């Protein structure tokens, strides 16, 4: 069983940066591929980025390639999402989960608001 808590969201102007964190409890974090997902107002939740259990990047959504960087620290049971060059289209609630995601692991997410 894994419990996930996202943090680091906030309000930022276009062009700014934020770093999201996903703190995991449970002993299985280090053996799971993990991912970031987001849900914009009025839209379905979508994939953002994924990372393998060993730290190798698996994939990015086309919309964030070159701007976002996913990473993890298994010693700290934490995953990160560095977001640069943010645009209003990045406004969403961001969630972490295993990759592929499991229904039972969705948390509250962390809200990111980008103003133009």
Image (cartoon, rainbow, N blue to C red):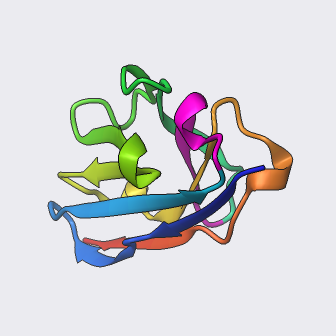
Residues in magenta? 27-41
Left or right: where does residue 67 sit relative to residue 6?
left
Q: Where is residue 62 in the image (x, y as percent from the top left)?
A: 40, 27
Q: Which of 79 and 90 is in front in this view?
A: 79
Residue at the image position 79 percent from the left and 41 percent from the top: 102
Farthest residue, direction bottom? 11
Q: Position of residue 106 (x, y in %)?
A: 73, 57
Residue at the image position 69 percent from the left and 65 percent from the top: 107
Residue at the image position 62 percent from the left and 66 percent from the top: 41
Residue 53 seen in the current view: yes
Quarter of the C terminus within the rendering: bottom left
Left or right: where does residue 27 sit relative to residue 106?
left
Residue 33 seen in the current view: no
Q: Nearer the viewer, residue 92 or 94?
A: 94
Q: Position of residue 1 (x, y in %)?
A: 78, 49
Q: Which of 28 and 47 is in front in this view?
A: 28
Q: Does the magenta stretch include residue 65?
A: no
Q: Position of residue 99 (x, y in %)?
A: 63, 31
Q: In this view, does 82 lie above or below 30?
A: below
Identify the image quadrant of residue 63. Answer: top left
Left or right: where does residue 4 sit relative to residue 53?
right
């Amino acid at each position: 069983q894994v419990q996930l808590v996202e943090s680091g969201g906030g309000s930022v102007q276009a062009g700014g940066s934020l770093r999201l964190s996903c703190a995991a409890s449970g002993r299985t974090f280090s053996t799971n591929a993990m991912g970031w997902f987001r849900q914009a107002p009025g839209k379905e939740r979508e994939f953002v980025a994924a990372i393998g259990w060993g730290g190798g990047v698996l994939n990015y959504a086309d919309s964030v390639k070159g701007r976002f960087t996913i990473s993890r620290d298994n010693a700290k049971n934490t995953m990160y999402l560095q977001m640069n060059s943010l645009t209003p289209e990045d406004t969403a609630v961001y969630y972490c989960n295993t990759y592929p995601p499991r229904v039972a692991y969705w948390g509250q997410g962390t809200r990111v608001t980008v103003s133009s």
